[in-house]
Amino acid sequence: MAEEKRRFSRIFFNMPTELTVADTCYTIEQVANLSIGGCLIKIKDDLPVGSECKIAIVLEQTPHDLRVEVIGEIVRSDAETVGIKFTRINPDDLIHLQNIIRYN
């Protein structure tokens, strides 16, 4: 059996997400794999590895549809998924992200 090398717990998160790469914004229905360190998004576009991106997770059913915003880097991309490593997050958004993962 392969040894697990991941440092963070991962969850499936069924909430709308916006991915912005360069000047293009993609609306994603769900995040296939979300952790404190990054995420995997199902998308039918082959995006350039190494590109900086912005992720905005929209928390519906919260006052004013609260958003968790994270800056990341595309570390993997193929015809169906994009793997993103989070590189910057402000402290308030980090707390919200930790709570999302803890309670899901």
Image: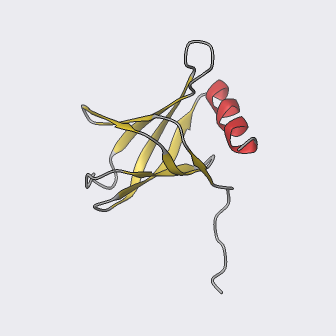
Q: Decide which of 88, 58 is in the foreground and name it.
A: 58
Residue at the location (25% across, 55% down)? 46
Residue at the location (67% across, 56% down)? 8
Quarter of the figure that contains the N terminus: bottom right
Q: Is residue 25 left or right of residue 42?
A: left
Image coords of residue 87 (percent x, y): 51, 43
Q: Residue furthest top?
A: 64
Q: Residue furthest right?
A: 102
Image coords of residue 82 (percent x, y): 38, 54
Q: Quadrant of residue 81?
A: bottom left
Q: Decide which of 29, 75 is in the foreground and name it.
A: 29
Is 25 drawn above or below residue 38 in the view shown? above
Q: Is residue 9 left or right of residue 37?
A: right
Q: Decide which of 51, 56 is in the foreground and name it.
A: 56
Is 49 drawn above or below residue 88 in the view shown? below
Is 74 drawn above or below residue 52 in the view shown? below
Image coords of residue 10 (percent x, y): 63, 55
Q: Quadrant of residue 24?
A: top left
Q: Decide which of 90, 81 is in the foreground and name it.
A: 81
What colour scheme has been applied to the protein in the rendered image?
secondary structure
Q: Is residue 59 left or right of residue 55?
A: right
Residue at the location (24% across, 31% down)? 23
* Total numbered labels: 0
Residue at the location (64% across, 64% down)? 6
Quarter of the figure that contains the C terminus: top right
Is 15 drawn above or below residue 63 in the view shown? below
Image coords of residue 76 (percent x, y): 38, 60
